Amino acid sequence: MEANLQWLDDPQVFRVNQLPAHSDHSWYATKQEVTEGSSLSQSLNGLWDFYYAQNYRTYPTGFEQPDFALTDFTQITVPQHIEMAGFNKLHYINTMYPWEGHEFRRPPFTSQNQVTLFAQALDNHIGCYRKEFTLKQSWRTKNVLIRFEGVEQAFYLWLNGHFIGYAEDSFTPSEFDLTSYLNYDGANHLAVAVYQRSTAAYLEDQDFFRFFGIFRNVSLLAFGQNHLADLWLKPTVNSDYRSGRLSAQLKFDNITPNAVVKASVLTPAGQLLTQLTQGLAKETTLDFGEFSDILLWDHYQPNLYKLQLEMLTADQTLCEYSEYDFGFREICLKDKVMYLNGKRLIINGVNRHEWHPTKGRAIDLADMQADLETIKQANINGVRTSHYPNQIPWYFLCDQAGIHLMAETNLETHGTWQKPVGIEPSYNVPGNISQWFGAVLDRAKTNFETFKNHPSILFWSLGNESYAQEGLRLMNEYFKQVDPSRLVHYEGNFNNPEFEDCISDIKSCMYAHPAAIEEYLTTKAKKPFILCEYMHDMGNSLGGMNDYMQLLDKYEMYQGGYIWDFKDQAIFVKDEITGQDVLRYGGDFDDRPSDYEFSGNGIVFADGQAKPAMQEVKYYYGKYRNY
């Protein structure tokens, strides 16, 4: 197969040769490597050769070939946004698409269809990456994958001149099998062409700075015999909330005769609770039975048990080791009220973009830990991952800290239905257009498959601000089929009440006044009510929070909400006059169209310093605590 530039213009092509999504577990050659670092992983982060092409006309044809002369190339750090490396223009926009007013474009298969959108567009910039690497000698007999944890927005991949695959969906991992084209005895030449725009742009119209490039980790992963390909842990809680059961569904590759898995469950204190050994099959189910006196997972006591898995050959040789922390907890609806572990749930939440004032969204573990510490100090118990899957470590950190997550799918099509004239969904996607259903269902599936084992996730969210029609209904149906143990959230039916009963377990609104909430709860309430965005902390705002918090005492079905938002999106630049580092917002980079300082809605500044509004958040969230 050869790479095809027309894939950029076809919403029905969003993954080519990409491996299926799977659980975010890690695997090791030995148990000791959990603390020492896996010998089956090799980071490709660091300096890459790089060429910035303005468009397809200046694309360095043939750069994927190992003998291509890189004389016009410079270097770039991976992970990093191309814009933050000094290439391309910084651009912030909320609702509209960034090309509005410059280029006329409409989504394919709508009433105003176009043949060509991005493949030959002069404003579709391209980042051309090259990386040379050699393999560990111990990997000679193993399968080797490459994992890109985040690439905006569409990319083509080659190894040693051979086309490997194509991927979209900027915020979930993309994996490809490199085994067939690897050179085990010398240098390997990796080439990646990242296009700023494709039809995926219509699905990623989030309220943020528009970046592109390889902005999350890149790594090689090796596996040999009896490889754990997927893990789905299923802890359940009995009605007494003191006992529960545990089972696990496992998938394996490269199974050898008479191989077994030895599974151990440890208590939160690290004591062995139970153990079993079972033969391997392509799909294997482990049933650990019932446990008494379990310790539940919640915000105040995030008790985590541990599953240890040893994959052994018939002669008991260890092939692979993996472990995963999990928790016993139950989220459910009863009499139109959400309960966590049998107690009414109150969401003292915040929306959180991944952000750093010098790195943009290319944050690291230390940045996540700093965010989490601020969140805990403010008595926040819930985070909405607005509006895309976050980096994998964030979910593990929230498991450990007891933070309830609304795990959002990477979907926002705001600009296809909300126009300057108001709500006008004539070319809304995915809408009722079947050619767009595959892409959004794939995004839902990848979100679920990657993060399904995290006790911190109480809600799957279909995304944000995409006018509710059949495509969203199908996403909801998917989540309900694969994971009835969690609730599904979506706010977009607010603008299209026809889908009220089939798209969300919760009545969710943005910025409703307290009187409007009371009117819903007293006259027509069918579901528990939350505010997926409220208080909008822009400038010297966030006053009147008490009016919302008092509703928690008056109405059981009102269960809180998520402040918009956690951190300002602003970028440190050197002031032209003073020479000092200053924070600049949307519109400060000659970016048009722009929503200007609308990028500054946080309860903390972009550098993490608390705003005065944080005092009110901490006070009221501390006053109305239940989890």
Image (tube, rainbow, N blue to C red):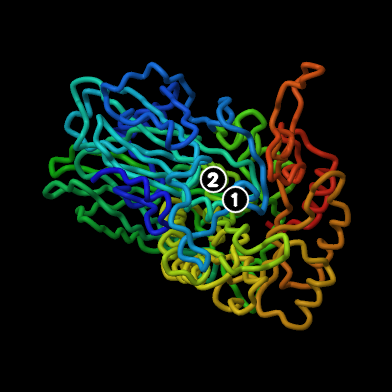
Spot occupied by residue 28 in the image (x, y as percentages of width and height) = 32, 35
* Horizontal relation, residue 10 to residue 387: left or right: left
Spot occupied by residue 79 in the image (x, y as percentages of width and height) = 49, 30
Residue 438 showing in the rendered view: yes
N-terminal of the pair, mark 1 or mark 2, is 1
| Residue neighbourhood size for the residue with mark 1, other residues' Cα within 10 Å, grouped as few (<14), some (14–19), many (≥20) | many
Spot occupied by residue 91 in the image (x, y as percentages of width and height) = 64, 39
Residue 453 showing in the rendered view: no
Label 1: state its secondary structure.
loop
The residue pinned by badge 1 equals 385
* Horizontal relation, residue 41 to residue 197: left or right: left
Q: Please give the name of the residue rendered at 77% of the width and 20% of the height, measured from the top-left corner.
A: 576
Q: Nearer the viewer, residue 25 or 360?
A: 360
The residue pinned by badge 2 equals 390
The amino acid beneath tag 1 is: Thr
Looking at the image, the residue that sits furthest to the left is 257
* Horizontal relation, residue 463 to residue 12: left or right: right
The amino acid beneath tag 2 is: Asn
**3D distance between C-alphas at marks 1 and 2:** 6 Å
Which image quarter: residue 493? bottom right
| Residue neighbourhood size for the residue with mark 2, other residues' Cα within 10 Å, grouped as few (<14), some (14–19), many (≥20) | many
Which image quarter: residue 31? top left
The C terminus: image quadrant: bottom right
